[in-house]
Amino acid sequence: MKVRNWDLEFNKIMKTRLSILFLVLATAFAHAPAQTLAEAQTWYREGRYADALPVFRAEYEANPNNPSLNVWLGISEYETGKWREAEKYLQFASKKNQPDAFLYLGDIYAKTYRLKEAEDEYAKYERAKRRDKVALSALEPRREYAGRLSSLLRKVEDLQIIDSVVVDKNALLSAYTLSAASCSLLPMGDFFKGQDDKGKPLFLNERKDKIYYAQGDPASGLDLYSMEKLLDNFGNEKRLPASINTSGDEAYPFVMPDGLTLYFASTGNGSIGGYDLFVTRYNLSTDSYLNPGWQNMPFNSPFNDYMMAVDEERGIGCFASDRYQPEGKVCVYTFIPSREISLLESDDEQYLAKRARIAAVRDSWREGVDYSPLLTDVYSSDRLREQESEVDFSFVINDERTYYALSDFNSDQARNLFSRAEDKEKLLSATRQELTEKRNQYANSGGDNATLRTSILQLERETESLWKEVEQLKIQSRNEEIKSKNR
């Protein structure tokens, strides 16, 4: 009688079952990407761009030359606020004659003041969709918007911006250091205990007897209110008038020491994109506010611009913007306030666009003006210069690229130049600190110490020299990196 080897039979059975299981799983995974891509396309059509993005990105890695995929990925990036990432995909798709790419690429060009290129893309879309009236209806408001930007670019203010610093948006107020004669800017949660301020600050005047703040809900949006000091508490809440509070959001109030001039940010009132900065003035004779005035470029942009604050005692002002910044970051600009508005006089559209974008702070500096005293004041204040975050630094290369780590550099020479600039900047910071200490010692001595006076003058010269070295090294680094990218 033949005896069966049960161990051998069992192994054969298990191998057969595992082979079948492997075949089933392999078939399922082979079809999974197509099903996932189909789902992503459905989400895309439903406007669920954030859900579709990871799938489109994964598919793009496997098939970067697919025109349709570039359109879907580009538009999804744009609609989720990552317009800088979107541009390269839409440019590729535009070259492949994808009509939707024409439309969105035109929007990106318009928002970065490349208005001729924007119109070129819109014209291509118009030709591609000439028989589709529904599709063409999306074009008219875009052209009107681009036309409005073109008109506003003829009125760019000659604003002297002396400094800029990038911080986390939730640490915005750390970049505003105002003299006691100006006011206090406080998080709402610090004043109204337990209230979620959502990053919106409260304004407390220098006499500490009146506050301005934003509050609201998702249904009505944010509106501006004021309260007055009544004995030990604040009360008599008043909603500011409809000329200020629109159907959009109003926030970031700042009142000048005259108690009449109010700066605020609004998504309504004729905003050109997100929050824009406005100014109004209280009329004592009529007990009302004047219609808000829109602040010229470069204060405003197609992105979020907010928190205008002017410190008359120090002769400086600040405003914040998330233009061209990574998600969650804002740039706080320090400028010199002017009593009279002076517009740039130029027929060079590229120059006007560059000044409107604030492509480089030094572009706004006037020949022969010494900005070092103001810069010394800015840098020696307690303002937070570097926010603790995931990035090492923030270095703008051009309108399209900002570096946050040395590994971002393509050129070794550019990286070395920037490292030298960082070393000099550390020395500059230490020198400024020593200068501040010497000035305090001199003030406490009654201003009659020749040795300290000589030391202060020497440190001031060293500070100015180091600052110029840092700026020159950064310019050289930026230029070298741009050249390496163009090779």
Image: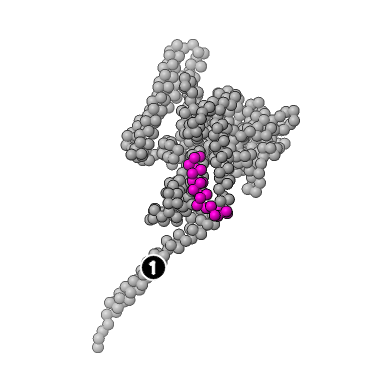
Q: Quadrant of residue 197?
A: top right
The answer to whether residue 265 is magenta is: no
Q: Position of residue 119 (x, y in %)?
A: 51, 43
Q: Main secondary structure of the magenta part?
A: helix
Q: Quadrant of the N terminus?
A: bottom left
Q: Which of 227/110 is in front? A: 110
| Residue located farthest toward the bottom when viewing the structure as drawn | 1
Residue underneath mark 1: 27
Q: Is residue 99 above or below residue 297?
A: below
Q: Is residue 334 above or below residue 117?
A: above
Q: Quadrant of residue 300?
A: top right
Q: Position of residue 224 (x, y in %)?
A: 66, 38
Task: Decide if residue 421 is in sight here.
Answer: no
Looking at the rendering, the stretch of residues picked out in magenta corresponds to: 115-135
Hey, what amino acid is under mark 1?
A: Thr
Q: Residue at x 63, y 41 (%)?
A: 268
Q: Position of residue 463 (x, y in %)?
A: 42, 22
Q: Is residue 267 left or right of residue 89?
A: right
Secondary element at tag 1 = helix
Classify 10 Å Cα crowding around label 1: few (below 14), some (14-19), many (20 and above): few
Q: Residue at x 42, y 51 (%)?
A: 96
Q: Is residue 230 left or right of residue 192?
A: right
Q: Residue at x 41, y 66 (%)?
A: 28
| Residue located farthest toward the right when viewing the structure as drawn | 286
Q: Residue at x 49, y 23 (%)?
A: 366
Q: Which of 128/300 is in front? A: 128
Task: Decide if residue 183 is in sight here.
Answer: yes
The answer to whether residue 128 is magenta is: yes
Q: Is residue 110 left or right of residue 213?
A: left
Q: Which of 336/116 is in front? A: 116
